[in-house]
Amino acid sequence: MAGTYSRATEVLVVGGGPGGYMAAIRLGQLGHKALVVERSELGGECLNRGCIPSKALIHASLLYHRLRTEGEEIGVTASGLTVDMVRLQAFKSAVITKERQGVQTLLKAAGASVLPGEVRFTGPTTAELTAPDGGRERIDFAHAVIAVGAVPSSFPGFEPDGTKVLTAWQILSLDRIPSSLLVLGGGVSGCELGEFFARLGTRVTIVELLPQILPGLEASLSRELSSALEKLGVAVRPATKAVQLDRSGDGVRLGVEGAGGREELTAEMLFLTVGKRPETAALGLEEAGVLRDSRSGFIGVDAQQRTNVPNLYAVGDCCRPPMLAHKAYREGIVAAEAIAGLPTRYEFQTIPSVVFTVPELASVGLTLADAQAKGIGAREAKFPFAAIGRAHANHATGGWVKVVAEEPGGLLLGVHAAGEGVGEFITEAALALEMGATVRDLAMTIHPHPTFSEALEEAALLWLGEPMHVAKRGSGAGRP
């Protein structure tokens, strides 16, 4: 109810997304009470408008597409296949609701309290909460964890309108299949959701400003996906700049400039996915004394997630890239442990990443180009899925695993993979990197047969010059 009240808490957690709720749970485990304030839904963008809903939709589109394109070849036939977007959206919403309830249960078990509303700091130990009904509360706290996340970016002339120009948040809730779609931005979201709609029959064009889609990812992974998208019928336009948008009439017309000069692309809708920006401007950070980068909006933190104000911490998308839920998880845990006085640090060798396209892409550690840029003598070996039994059994031979290791000792530097299931075993490579493993360690680890993970072992053997399931070449990747 409306009014002005006050309360006190040991730890105020601003935001109930991955970083925030993980911090609150860990605080509870360590005997510290947290008050979580969330302005929208528990679980944040990942659970409600990102990772989880997109994977629910992608799963459905894969089922539909594989029955239509692969079923007959392997003896599975079906007729009258259709996609009911209304029912699909209901399935997606049910998944989100169940997961959100799970977060609520975990927070309750940890002794955390949850309030809806928006927080603005009024000092280093005080904040004002504005409830949905307009009521206000003063909150006094000893520590605070800022976990407000980020919002989709846009630029002048291309602002989302929810009808013809959509953000990822909006396009995930479409209850119909557009006839055509322009995707402005060839990052993870653009590729995953662009491919999702293409599998359902939408004519899709992906426009990316930089020389490759999935900028920053290992180059051969980008090429692998570009090839797969084009086979699906998606037009991939890297090194292409959007210069003008006309949304008059029935659809949109996008003026672009690329190697071939100026041209106009048309579609029913435009999916704008050009990155995200931290949502820190309205938090009252200045009143609390917290510094943030004036250009990027990121809040500066140290290895224990502390801001420049010792009792205030920041985690997740609002404090530094990469904007990944699993990175926010770790930061939330570190912040909680630091508040509890434990000797903790946000420190690791690398962060794995996965792109949920077909082929699935996974990457962890250095690429060969990264290693060479650092002056490290290194070599890579690439093992094809076509040489392992599980890939043939699953009708999924279009993939590979690449290992990058230091010469001459074989210290593992990175693993990059494309193909079915690679996101499920990239963590093995991440663990190997954290433990300082060599390619020999990977090669000596017995992998279960038949699995896709065998390709990791085989790639290590190939790097060593001891391949078991491909013929050794005279001048191949093996050790001289």
Image (tube, grey):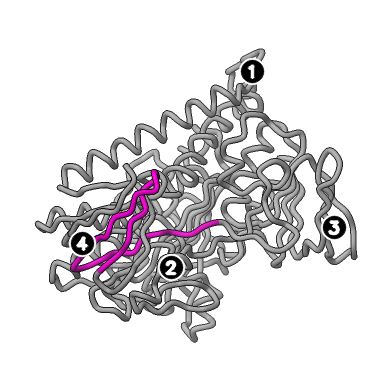
Q: Which residues are magenta?
A: 126-151
- Judging depth in this view, the residue of 474 and 220 nearest the camera is 220
Instruction: Report how many numbered discs are placed on residues in the image.
Output: 4
Q: Position of residue 320 (x, y in %)?
A: 43, 70
Nearer the viewer's eye, disc 2 or disc 1?
Answer: 1
Q: Is residue 373 above or below residue 263?
A: below
What number is the disc on residue 255? Answer: 3
Q: Secondary structure at mark 4?
A: strand
Residue at x 53%, y 73% (from the top left corner): 296
If you read the primary sequence from the N terminus, does the residue marked by circle 1 or circle 4 appear first?
4
CB under 8 Å between discs 3 and 1: no
Residue type at mark 2 is Gly
Q: Quadrant of residue 358?
A: top right
CB under 8 Å between discs 2 and 3: no
Nearer the viewer's eye, disc 1 or disc 4?
Answer: 4
Q: Is residue 312 above or below residue 44?
A: below
- Name the residue beneath numbered marker 4: 11
Q: Main secondary structure of the magenta part?
A: strand
Q: Is residue 368 magenta?
A: no
Residue at x 35%, y 32% (from the top left corner): 98
The N terminus, quarter of image: top left
